[in-house]
């Protein structure tokens, strides 16, 4: 479905109410409140596409299952050029009030679910989505294939000019005298 056909989703919501009514959300979330994501990319579109289904999960906590999609620009670590990447995290999160502690038996669960805490009243949808987008960012962003990189920059970085040179004894290095 094109973004132009999607509606803006609510800024805040009650996870308990959404889970009780099996609410389904499909629409857009504004990124202006996603400051941590903005700090970790060069640029991003103003809206993120989100599709979520709410139900009850483990221990009766609200469960959000779905997907998010965002297009971002980041810096390739190989050639230092800007590159576009798609972030498409699968979302599968239990939403727990921060005032409640988990039952002791949850510590031994082999596939323990991810939890997102909130104040117990309402949750900013952008907070939930931002966390998942941040986790889907590559640790070392780089073009999928080196042929997509800026070849001039790759060649320069591989050359002697791109490497840190070790100063000669004859240079103005104040520690050169220690070598004698």
Image (cartoon, rainbow, N blue to C red):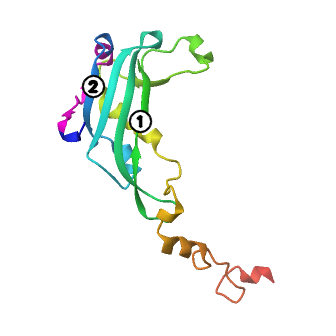
Q: Which residue is mark 1?
A: 131
The Cα–Cα distance between marks 1 and 2, rounded to whole angstroms, is 18 Å
Residue 91: percent from the left, percent from the top? 42, 29
Looking at the image, is 53 positioned above or below residue 73?
above
The residue carrying pointer 2 sits among few (fewer than 14), some (14 to 19) or many (20 or more) residues within 10 Å by Cα, namely some
Task: Say which element carries label 2.
Answer: strand
Q: Which residue is mark 2?
A: 25
Looking at the image, is 142 positioned above or below residue 64?
below
Residue 38: percent from the left, percent from the top? 35, 48
Residue 3: percent from the left, percent from the top? 23, 40
> Which residue is found at the position 53% from the left and 48% from the top?
139
- Which quadrant holds residue 118? top left
Q: Quadrant of the C terminus?
A: bottom right
- From which residue to which does the magenta span run? 5-18
Magenta residue check for 6: yes
- Which quadrant holds residue 66? top left
- Left or right of 10: which side holds 89? right
Which mark lies nearer to you, 1 or 2? 2
Looking at the image, is 136 positioned above or below residue 76?
above
Q: Is residue 78 visible?
A: no
């Amino acid at each position: 479905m094109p973004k132009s056909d999607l509606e803006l989703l609510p800024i805040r919501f009650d996870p308990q109410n959404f889970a009780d009514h099996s609410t389904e959300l499909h629409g857009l979330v504004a990124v202006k409140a996603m400051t941590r994501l903005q700090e970790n990319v060069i640029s991003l579109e103003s809206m993120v596409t989100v599709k979520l289904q709410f139900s009850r999960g483990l221990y009766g906590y609200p469960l959000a299952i779905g997907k998010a999609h965002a297009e971002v620009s980041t810096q390739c670590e190989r050639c230092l050029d800007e590159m576009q990447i798609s972030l498409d995290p699968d979302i599968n999160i239990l939403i727990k009030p921060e005032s409640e502690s988990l039952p002791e038996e949850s510590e031994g669960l082999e596939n323990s679910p991810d939890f997102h805490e909130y104040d117990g009243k309402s949750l900013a949808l952008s907070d939930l989505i931002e966390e998942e987008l941040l986790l889907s960012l590559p640790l070392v962003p780089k073009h999928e294939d080196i042929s997509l990189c800026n070849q001039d920059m790759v060649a320069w970085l591989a050359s002697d000019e791109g490497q840190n040179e070790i100063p000669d004894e004859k240079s103005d290095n104040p520690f050169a005298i220690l070598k004698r």
